[in-house]
Amino acid sequence: GMKDSIKTITNLVEDEDPLVRLASAWALLQLDPSNPDYIALAVPRLRQALERPDPRVRRQALETLRQLGPAGSAAADSVAERLTQDDVPALRALAAAVLVDQQALKPSHIPGCVALLEAEEPAVRRAGLY
């Protein structure tokens, strides 16, 4: 039943494969995004996913953190690193949006947002105006 499914997903949060950890964190949050236990399990895995070389993985982690809003703000420092260090401009822009939605944007993040204004892509420049 549902309890067994949740237990299985919760166990997969500790899987040896980082993509399985990310997917299980995402799945828990889809089941109940306000559950503090799920958030406590998921946010560290999402932070780890932000360091993965695959930009699709980083995008999924950022999008999931954005959905969490302020509940995911424990990952704000890692998100801020993406704002200034990600090699994909669209992910830097998404990181800015995550920080805004987490209510975690700090004055120290402003230079990273300003740098977005110089991007070629209009969507990235718009994100810098958050």
Image: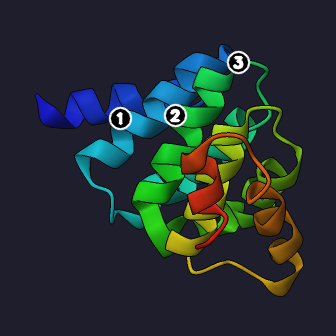
**Within-10-Å neighbours for mark 2: few <14, some 14–19, many 20+:** some
Depth check, mark 1 against mark 3: the one in front is 3
Can residue 121 be seen here? Answer: yes
The quadrant where residue 45 appears: top right
**Earlier sequence position, callout 1 versus callout 2:** 1
**Cα distance, mark 3 to mark 2?**
10 Å
Of residues 119 and 1, the one nearer the viewer is 119
Residue beneath disc 3: 54
Asked if 42 appears above or below 21 in the picture, the reply is below
* Amino acid marked by disc 1: Ala
Which residue is nearer to you in this view: 97 or 1? 97
Residue of label 2: 60
Amino acid at dot 2: Gln
Residue 69 left/right relative to 108: left
Q: Return the residue nearer the eye: 109 or 33.
A: 109
Q: Is residue 22 left or right of residue 5?
A: right
Q: What count of labels does the image hold?
A: 3
Mark 1 and mark 3: Cα distance apart in space: 20 Å
Q: Rounded to the nearest whole Å, what is the CA distance between mark 1 and mark 2?
A: 12 Å
Q: Residues within 10 Å of mark 3 (few under 14, many from 20)?
A: few
Q: Position of residue 115 (x, y in %)?
A: 84, 59
Instruction: Looking at this view, name the residue that lies furthest to the left.
Output: 1
Q: Secondary structure at mark 1?
A: helix
The spot of residue 74 in percent (x, y) is 67, 67
- In the rendered image, the residue lying farthest to the top is 17
Image quadrant containing the C terminus: bottom right
Q: Quadrant of residue 8?
A: top left
Return the x and y of residue 122 as percentages of the image width and height. 58, 48
